[in-house]
Amino acid sequence: MPLNLPEGKKIAVNIGCDFDAHSVWMGTFGKTSPSYLSRGEFCAEVGVPRILSLFDRYKIAGTWCTPTHSMETFPDAFQSIVDAGQEVAAHGCYHESVPSLDLDTERHLMDKTLKLHEKYVGKRPRGYRSPAWDFTEHTMSILEEHGFEWDSSLMGRDFEPYHPRPVEVRWEEGSVLGAPSPILEFPVSWFLDDFPAAEYIPGVNQGFESTASMYERWKDHFDYCYDNVPGGVMALTVHPQTIARAHHIIMFEKLLDYMSGHDGVWFASLSDIYDTWTEN
């Protein structure tokens, strides 16, 4: 493995908090009723403080993937994340549907994202997570042009970082894979995301999965990585408006207890993990 984790550390665990607030309802689902927006308000006013408190108790350095809409709508909640020393990664402007964007719009939104990071964070982000984990054929090249070091949106591995390759899709012949990107990919998985399992959206997503089921699935991922992928990375994605609900956060704390009870587990930001990467 090209990851040289700190001495005594066996695997890295990143908890990526997607601070979507209003934007996920507006951008991904096209919903702006007071009911949906109130769920985004819960994210900022209740979810963020609960997660920061939990991170403080367990000494967790996470990565907060934050649309700039959340920074501007809930500046106090966002500032509390920055003040806590947590990493902030790019996550679009308003949780836009990336695959629907034309090239000019995608470039415009990326430029605005970077400018607002400089305004509210004080520096450009090192990494990017696509809203809803999807790309256009131009997204990776845009990330490269803007000097991003890492991405965490794709699913070509499970516990091993890798360099993603563009794909020329062919139908009657095999697809053709291009040259690897210089950007390092920290792979994600819908199985390691609280939102589809737990967030109820009438007519769209059932949610309501039991916390016991979520716990066992996340525990199984951790166990496999710990036992079989030394030097690997488990990237878990949570949303403050979801994971901070009472029943979910009880389960989440149980999981943190379990993982932190293993020797050699390093809870780290994705940029800190990136800094341990060396090319073969």
Image (spheres, helix red, strand yellow):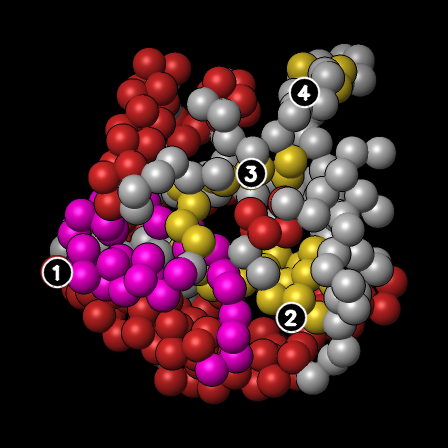
* Residue under numbered circle 2: 218
Residue visible at 36% across and 22% down? Answer: 106
* Residue under numbered circle 3: 151
- Dot 3 or dot 2: first in sequence order is 3
Residue visible at 65% across and 25% down? Answer: 182
Q: Quadrant of the C terminus?
A: top right
Task: Say the numbered circle drawn on residue 34.
Answer: 1
- Dot 4 or dot 3: first in sequence order is 3
Position of residue 223 relative to residue 104, above or below, is below
Q: Position of residue 22 (x, y in %)?
A: 23, 54
- Dot 4 or dot 2: first in sequence order is 4
- Front disc: 3 or 1: 3
Residue visible at 73% across and 17% down? Answer: 179
- Dot 4 or dot 1: first in sequence order is 1
Q: Which residues are magenta?
A: 57-85
Between 104 and 50, the residue placed more toward the observer is: 50
Residue visible at 58% across and 79% down? Answer: 256
Pointer 4 and pointer 1: residues touching (CB < 8 Å)?
no
Give the residue type at disc 1.
Answer: Pro
Q: CA distance from mark 2 to mark 1?
A: 33 Å
